[in-house]
């Protein structure tokens, strides 16, 4: 391995070009193999244009470039697009692509590919609200793409970053085959990002190699990134401790997080998960029995000791979350009605709602234990906590995700712990839980059956508001209303952590964690 | 002739068994609420009802149950195990990719368990109250009682974390360069812990059984006669007694073959071994019906082949089986 020393000026230039790397402390070393892993198993495909989620996003964001990237302060930065502007009326977004960008087969990336990719994503990506207002994409010249919108769509800027808008080659994917099942989604991938695919061995590894034709000549620093598929958390933890792995991401088990915090030579952080934005909440079906009454839902929140969940069950690994918007989001409003643990208030509200205590009991409810790990202790805690105010809770458990999702999608539940991701902009991951037009529309829709015309109206306005301050005010109001109506009781931001060895430098500092090109990452000499 | 007739009958029974495996499992998977569309939605971070319906239509999950079953059986009869819903690739390809890893693990573990089990069994049978005999008993109890995933994690902590002898998982280290021998050594290094974990359970069984059976044989009349006519002890044990004593061990090994395969599912999962077990675990959780059925089909084939092989070995070792006396 040849170590090329950079001059001071070179390092300065590199750090200014690499906006999101901030001020580079050390001189990045060239070359080397970074071995990483994450909590998901083998991804279905490697093409984020047709498959969302972290499993595909991890390799996908290195293989495919997006028009923009986001820094840690939620500001868009140039990536494949050097510059961009939004028209006065907000109905046109123009992208100016960089001149020297090529796909991994050497073919130049043009506005035609951008138009094609947007069309593919609009038709195949599951996050439909992301590009729904896009009517057409004009390509006046090979380096200019004009996205035409039905109405102003502030979400679009964020939807052009991270795992959300991979630019894919039209000359490969435009052959008429169905994009969802296209063979090139996981074999012979021709991407647009800083790394190209060498090998995809399911259940073993994904090997990525530096693309020499990448437009930034000196990037990426690494020769290779190997993504090892290690779905067992115990194996990943030991591999981090003994140095077989240099990075693992999306770690969410509190015991694993604690163990990694203690490991020598390993740094662990929950920074950078604001874009993915996962939240844990207690969902309450507002269409069933006593839960139809707002006071009953509030009483349940009062009866649950949030601090006990945060400190005793989650060992302090999770941030407090008070609304459906992630605490790291610029739209988060912490000044909403909260429900400090208070059994007397809970009892009074239940009495008021017409459910007096009879023989130590008021009524019965079911709680669904999710078909994914990590929620058992919380579910049993709710049963114990609600027993104290006379609500008898029956825990119903499910062997796997599919059987649980079936019940949730059909809204056949009273209470359930749920884990829902923001995916960057409220229009993508938040509206779906609260708007009345999305009631009972599959798992992670408005499964609470919540319907409030005022909320529908505010969210519709916020979706079209290009003025950031006005938009923030709308979301503040929305969060206050929902915290009062309480169709779900948000408890915490799901703990998600990245652990990395001390010899890894230049890790992404954006909002998408490791769902980033990682062209600035390097191994310290 | 006799062998041919028995083999033919065996094949007929096996075909019926395979049919039962396919139909029963198809029904069972179908009875569970939820389907692969839900798990695809999970992997995507959510999808609305329209997308779910589209996925179901793409895979024919919106058809009546009996039509789905009929279509599946029709395909299997044409040697087509279908395409994985989750990975969008032919099931046969997915399985054949992983079969060598599983066979390597299972055959090595089974052979190791048998050889060590028989050797320690024979030794401890000769001195039933000796140190080795007691040691074998203790290790056997421990090996049989401890669940494989627990043994596996303990071994990982000891040999991967405390002393860095063996890697934590996988089958290959992608940074290893060099020729065939370098790669073989690398795979062997990755194999040590999973093979050891998988074989301990069965080693215990074989060792205990071999010890008991050997002790019984050593007490029989013909052994006493052999000793009386002045044969050296080594010859009595290995030439005369062992063949008889092995018979029940071989029978058990054949019966245990299916247990070794199911044990492999757990061991592979703990050690991220890229075999059928890891795949099985993933696709069961994902409700990927064609792949689950394909794996069960192949596992059943392996077990049937293993049992057939046991029969043949039995006939070689014990002439009484051949003549039916």
Image (spheres, rainbow, N blue to C red):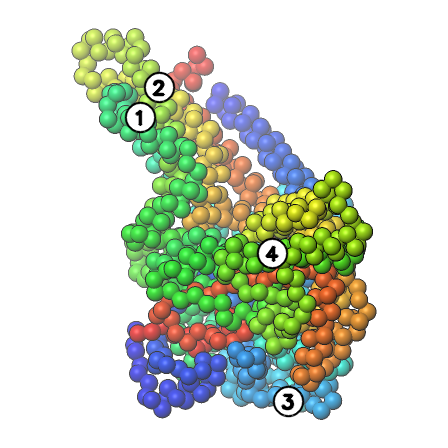
Question: Do discs 2 and 4 share a chain?
Answer: no
The first of marks 1 and 2 along the sequence is 1
Give residue A85's mark. Answer: 3
Indicate the chain on which mark 3 is placed: A
Disc 2, disc 3: CB below 8 Å? Answer: no
Q: Of tags 2 and 3, which is closer to the observer?
A: 3
- The answer to whether residue A336 shows anywhere in this view is yes
Where residue B18 sits: x, y (%)?
59, 35
Disc 1, disc 3: CB below 8 Å? Answer: no
Disc 1, disc 2: CB below 8 Å? Answer: yes
Task: Locate residue B105: give its quadrant.
Answer: top left
Indicate the chain on which mark 4 is placed: A
Closest to the observer: A73 or B195? A73
Query: Vertically, is A524 above or below A6?
Result: above
Q: Which residue is mark 2?
A: B213
Along the horizontal axis of the image, is A472 left or right of B282? right
- Badge 1: residue crowd in 10 Å (few <14, some 14–19, many ≥20): many
* Residue at 29% from the left image edge and 77% from the top image edge: A2
- The answer to whether residue A107 shows anywhere in this view is no
Query: Vertically, is B266 above or below A158?
Result: above
The first of marks 4 and 3 along the sequence is 3
Numbered label tally:
4
Helix, strand or loop under label 3: strand
Q: CA distance from mark 1 to mark 3?
A: 80 Å
* Residue at 38% from the left image edge and 71% from the top image edge: A504
Q: CA distance from mark 2 to mark 3?
A: 85 Å
- Badge 3: residue crowd in 10 Å (few <14, some 14–19, many ≥20): few
Closest to the observer: B308 or A369? A369
Q: Which residue is mark 1?
A: B121
């Amino acid at each position: 391995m040849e170590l090329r020393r950079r001059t001071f000026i070179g390092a300065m230039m590199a750090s200014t070009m690499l906006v999101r790397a901030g001020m580079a402390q050390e001189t990045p070393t060239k070359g080397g193999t970074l071995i990483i892993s994450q909590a998901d198993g083998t991804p279905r495909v490697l093409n984020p244009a047709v498959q969302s989620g972290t499993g595909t996003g991890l390799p996908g964001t290195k293989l495919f470039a997006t028009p923009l990237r986001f820094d840690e302060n939620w500001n868009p930065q140039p990536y494949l697009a050097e510059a961009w502007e939004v028209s006065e009326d907000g109905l046109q977004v123009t992208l100016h692509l960089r001149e020297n960008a090529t796909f991994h087969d050497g073919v130049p990336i043009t506005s035609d590919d951008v138009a094609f990719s947007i069309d593919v994503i609009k038709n195949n990506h599951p996050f439909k609200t992301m590009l729904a207002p896009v009517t057409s994409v004009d390509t006046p010249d090979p380096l200019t793409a004009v996205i035409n919108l039905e109405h102003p769509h502030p979400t679009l800027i964020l939807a052009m970053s991270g795992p959300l808008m991979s630019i894919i080659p039209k000359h490969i994917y435009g052959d008429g085959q169905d994009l969802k099942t296209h063979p090139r989604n996981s074999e012979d991938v021709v991407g647009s990002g800083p790394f190209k695919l060498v090998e995809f061995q399911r259940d073993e590894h994904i090997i990525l190699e530096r693309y020499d034709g990448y437009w930034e000549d000196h990037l990426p620093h690494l020769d290779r990134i190997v993504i090892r598929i290690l779905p067992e958390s115990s194996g990943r933890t030991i591999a981090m401790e003994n140095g077989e792995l240099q990075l693992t991401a999306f770690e969410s088990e509190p015991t694993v997080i604690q163990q990694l915090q203690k490991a020598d030579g390993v740094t662990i952080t929950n920074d950078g998960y604001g874009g993915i934005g996962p939240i844990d909440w207690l969902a309450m079906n507002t269409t069933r029995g006593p839960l139809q009454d707002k006071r009953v839902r509030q009483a349940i929140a009062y009866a649950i000791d949030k601090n006990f969940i945060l400190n005793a069950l989650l060992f302090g690994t999770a941030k407090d979350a008070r609304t459906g918007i992630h605490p790291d989001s610029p739209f988060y409003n912490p000044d909403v009605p909260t429900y400090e643990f208070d059994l007397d208030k809970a009892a009074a509200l239940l009495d008021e709602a017409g459910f007096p205590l009879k023989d130590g009991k008021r009524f019965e409810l079911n709680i669904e234990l999710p078909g994914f790990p990590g929620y058992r202790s919380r579910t049993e805690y709710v049963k114990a906590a609600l027993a104290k105010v006379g609500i008898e809770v029956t825990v119903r458990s499910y062997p796997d995700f599919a059987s649980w999702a079936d019940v949730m999608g059909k809204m056949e539940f009273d209470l359930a712990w749920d884990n829902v991701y923001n995916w960057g902009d409220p229009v993508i991951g938040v509206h779906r839980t609260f708007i009345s037009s999305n009631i009972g529309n599959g798992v992670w829709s408005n499964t609470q059956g919540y319907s409030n015309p005022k909320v529908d109206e505010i969210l519709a306005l916020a979706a079209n508001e290009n003025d950031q301050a006005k938009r923030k005010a709308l979301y503040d109001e929305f969060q206050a209303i929902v915290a009062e109506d309480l169709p779900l009781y948000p408890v915490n931001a799901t703990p998600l952590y990245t652990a990395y060895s001390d010899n890894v430098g230049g890790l992404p500092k954006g909002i998408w964690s490791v769902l980033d090109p990682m062209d600035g990452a390097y191994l310290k000499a | 002739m006799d062998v041919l007739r028995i083999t033919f009958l065996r094949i007929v029974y096996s075909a019926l068994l395979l049919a039962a495996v396919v139909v029963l499992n198809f029904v069972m998977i179908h009875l569970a609420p939820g389907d692969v569309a839900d798990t695809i939605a999970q992997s995507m971070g959510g999808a609305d009802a329209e997308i779910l319906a589209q996925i179901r239509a793409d895979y024919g999950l919106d058809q009546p149950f009996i039509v789905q079953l009929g279509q599946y059986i029709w395909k299997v009869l044409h040697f087509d195990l279908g395409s994985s819903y989750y990975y969008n690739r032919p099931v046969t390809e997915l399985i054949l990719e992983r079969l060598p890893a599983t066979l390597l693990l299972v055959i090595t573990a089974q052979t190791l368990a048998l050889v060590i089990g028989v050797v320690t069994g024979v030794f401890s049978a000769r001195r039933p109250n000796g140190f080795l005999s007691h040691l074998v008993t203790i290790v056997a109890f421990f090996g049989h009682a401890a669940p494989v995933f627990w043994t596996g994690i303990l071994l990982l902590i000891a040999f991967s974390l405390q002393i860095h002898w063996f890697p934590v998982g996988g089958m290959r280290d992608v940074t290893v360069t060099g020729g065939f021998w370098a790669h073989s050594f690398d795979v062997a290094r990755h194999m040590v812990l999973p093979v050891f974990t998988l074989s301990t359970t069965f080693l215990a069984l074989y060792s205990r059984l071999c010890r008991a059976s050997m002790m019984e044989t050593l007490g029989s009349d013909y052994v006493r006669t052999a000793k009386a006519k002045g044969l050296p002890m080594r010859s009595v044990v290995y030439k005369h007694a062992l063949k008889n004593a092995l018979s029940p061990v071989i029978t058990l090994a054949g019966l245990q073959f299916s247990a070794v395969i199911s044990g492999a599912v757990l061991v592979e999962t703990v050690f991220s071994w890229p075999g059928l077990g890891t795949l099985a675990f993933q696709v069961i959780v994902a409700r990927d019906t064609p792949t689950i059925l394909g794996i069960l089909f192949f596992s059943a084939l392996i077990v049937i082949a293993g049992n057939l092989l046991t029969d043949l070995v039995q006939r070689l070792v014990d002439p009484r089986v051949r003549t039916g006396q």
